Each structure stands twice: as C-alpha cells, then as structure tokens.
Image: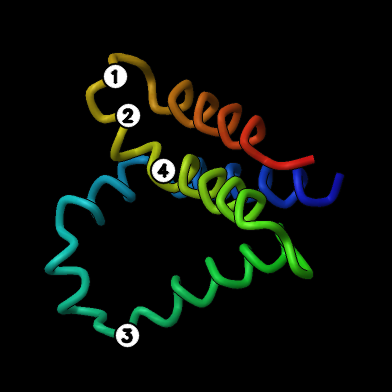
C-alpha cells in the first residue's frame, strides 16, 4: 500500500539523518528555535505527510494512528536514548512500531 511505502521511506530518511541529529534538536530546542524561528518548514512538511497518509475525511482514530506512526519514527532518537542498543536497531524498531500503527 502506498501509505505504508511513504511511511517506510520517511523512516529511511530519518534513519539516514541519524538519531543523533534528532537528539541534538531535542536537547537544544531553544537554541535551534532562536536560530531558526520560522517553524513553517518542518511543520508544513509534517502537515503534508499527514494529508498524504490520511487523505479525505478520515476518522479521528485514523488521523491519530497516522500522526502517532510518524511520531514513532521522529521521536525514536529521543525516547530510545536510554535503550542500550545500536541506533540502527532503535530506528528499525521505530519503523516496525510505526508500520503497526498505520491504519489499513
């Protein structure tokens, strides 16, 4: 299904960027926002992904599943920080969780 493919590609991009970069963003959020106060870039990208993955008039539950699936990938670097495992294993786990959350 196209939605699962889009989600899998997003997971690949996030893994390629690296969980370390995301951890840096989370740890230094105030500084990052001061340097780049215009949040429209990433906010707009996420909004477009939500629309692609839950087009039309999806139920609230479907919208939440899609958003939570994307956040599972995005937040893996933050929530996986205390897990004793290589970053690629954490990213793979986040991808698996995200795909399980995607509505059919």
Q: Residue at x 62, y 63 (%)?
A: 50
Per the image, the residue denoted by label 3 is 38
From the viewer's side, name the closer residue of 55 and 44.
55
Circles 2, 1 touching at the beta carbon (< 8 Å) = yes
Per the image, the residue denoted by label 4 is 18
Q: Looking at the image, tell me whether mark 2 or mark 3 is earlier in sequence order.
A: 3
Q: Nearer the viewer, mark 2 or mark 4?
A: 2
The local crowd at label 3, few if under 14, some if 14 to 19, many if 20 or more residues have their Cα within 10 Å, is few
Q: Looking at the image, tell me whether mark 1 or mark 3 is earlier in sequence order.
A: 3
Quadrant of the rendered structure where residue 36 is? bottom left
Q: Secondary structure at mark 1?
A: loop
| Relative height, residue 38 to residue 23 (above, below) | below
Marks 2 and 1, how far apart in space? 5 Å
Residue 30 at x, y percent in the picture:
13, 67
- How is the model colour-coded? rainbow
Per the image, the residue denoted by label 2 is 80
Question: What is the quadrant of the N terminus in the image?
Answer: top right
Marks 1 and 4, how far apart in space? 16 Å
Q: Residue at x 80, y 40 (%)?
A: 104
Per the image, the residue denoted by label 1 is 83
Marks 3 and 4, how far apart in space? 23 Å
Residue 21 at x, y percent in the picture:
32, 49
Q: Looking at the image, tell me whether mark 1 or mark 4 is earlier in sequence order.
A: 4
């Amino acid at each position: 299904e196209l939605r699962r493919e889009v989600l899998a590609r997003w997971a690949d991009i996030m893994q390629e960027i690296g969980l370390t970069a995301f951890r840096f963003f989370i740890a230094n959020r105030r500084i990052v926002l001061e340097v780049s106060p215009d949040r429209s870039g990433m906010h707009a990208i996420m909004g477009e992904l939500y629309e692609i993955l839950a087009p039309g008039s999806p139920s609230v539950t479907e919208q939440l599943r899609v958003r939570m699936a994307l956040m599972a990938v995005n937040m893996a670097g933050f929530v996986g920080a205390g897990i004793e495992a290589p970053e690629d294993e954490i990213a793979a786990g986040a991808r698996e969780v995200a795909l399980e959350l995607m509505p059919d």
